[in-house]
Amino acid sequence: MNYSRCALIFLALLLCCSIPVMGVTTYPISDGPQMSAAISGTNEFSPGQDAVISVIVQNRGLNTLESSWAGGSDPAAAVTRPDLSTEYEVWQGSGTIPRDDVPTTAKLVTIALSPGDAPIDVTTGPQNIGDLASQTTATVRIGTKITSDATEGEYTLPLALQYTYLAASSQQAADVLQSDYQRVNVTLPLTIKIKPSVKIDVLDVVPENLSVGTGGYLNLTIKNTGFDDGKKATVRLIRNGNSPVIPTDSNVYIGDFPQDGTVTCRYKVAISDDAENQTYPVDVVVSYENLDGDMVTSASDTVGVPVLGKLTFAIVSDPISVTPGSSNVIAVQYRNTGTQTAYNAQARLSVVDPFTSSDNSAYLGDLKPGDTATAYFSINTDSAAPAQDHALDTEVRFRDALDNSQISDTFKVDIRVVPSSQPTGIAVFLPILLLAVIAIGAGYYLLVMRKKK
């Protein structure tokens, strides 16, 4: 073994251990994360509008100064102090643990928009946008609804931000790093503007002939209670969801619609068969040209439309009696028991065994509420018909106020089959004998009178 070579190597290692550890300590100056927010795109909205507000969140935090120092140092003595507006130091060198975070990074950023005093409803809840490093931005879309009664003006919306950042970090040993994170809550103002607009208020609702399953008219009186004068305006009637009130003529052009102006519009509407005797909603909006020359639509106004029950009829005549084997023309009296006029009404009788008919329909004419009319039907009764009560179906076909064909619900006509009252035995021949006696008497009288002459 070469002892001299081993001695040289040992001396070299000893010399290395005696040299101070070389390291680099940096001294960056920073205020930590500096957050700001602004609305991207338009911040002008109209009353009643469903608005999506795009918000840009930016972290403007900066490290403005760095210096370095070389020399030996104990890692446990190096401490980071990133207090706001305060100098701090980060020791890096041989045997230190690298830091994953920097003090200017905003971590776990959460934002939440509140309406404040603004006439707005926020429909999107708090959102987590993750980490936001220095000099980076994130765009968040927030759903809102401008209330229909919003007035013109500027409003401030508070935007609440919550995040954490690295406030301090100390290396207690070569393999131990202690970090201190602080939570920050800050509120930033966002400004929106409510533009002047046409706002409608339906003052009066007058239905004409609106009942279940029919069609009629709806008359509306509408006032512009907004702060804008609408030009080239059209008032539109819109079905509200699954409401049984269905507009069939939904647009009325009114031209200029100035502030505090009032107009009356008339619409054709249909009422579906599944409606009932109650009030149903319908929506009204105005499309118009605003001061900027843009075509816009006002917030809707929902109004109630009273719908009457389905047009009904009833039989008001007495039950009809017939005999087996007879042919009869029966008279049936119909009454309009509804609340609307039935135009060109026709009655139909459904004839079944033991009856037959060659004429089972009759014209009733126009029937106002409470009016009656008589229908005549020809029916034949089977000779084997049992003596009992029968009920035949009948219905009335008519036209509504919009000349649409309608059919009433089916109801009943009562017919009673009674036993025949024909004479039996000698009683059958009595009328013939009576006629024979009369004929003989008349012949005898003529013969006597001729002899006297």
Image: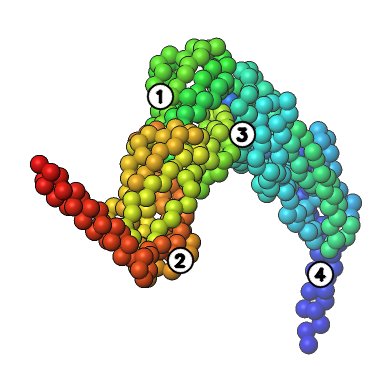
Q: Which mark is residue 146?
A: none
Q: Earlier in the sequence, mark 1 or mark 3?
A: 3
Residue 9: x and y in percent read: 79, 74
Between the C-alphas of marks 1 and 3, the distance is 27 Å
Image coordinates of residue 127 in percent, x first then y, are 68, 45
Question: What's the amino acid at mark 4?
Answer: Leu
Q: Position of residue 144 (x, y in %)?
A: 62, 36
**Residue 269 location, x and y as percent?**
43, 34
Residue with the mark numbered 1: 252
Gap between marks 1 and 2 measured at Cα: 63 Å
C-alpha span from label 2 to label 3: 73 Å
Q: Which residue is mark 2?
A: 387
- Mark 1 vs mark 2: give the one in front: 2
Residue at the spot x=84%, y=43% of the render?
A: 81
Q: Horizontal placement of 101 versus 303: left or right?
A: right
Mark 3, residue position: 145
Q: CA distance from mark 1 to mark 4?
A: 100 Å
Residue 189 versus residue 9 in the image, above or below: above
Quadrant of residue 358 within the rendered picture = bottom left
Disc 1 + disc 3, Cβ < 8 Å: no
Residue 13: mark: 4
Query: What is the distance, in whole Å, between disc 2 and disc 4 at their CAs?
Result: 134 Å
Give neighbour class at mark 2: few <14, some 14-19, many 20+ (Cα, 10 Å). some
Element under disc 1: strand
- The disc, 2 or 3, on the residue closer to the chain's N-terminal end is 3
Mark 1 and mark 4 lie on one chain; the one further toward the N terminus is: 4
Q: Mark 1 against mark 3, which lies toward the viewer?
A: 1
Give the foreground label among 2 and 3.
2
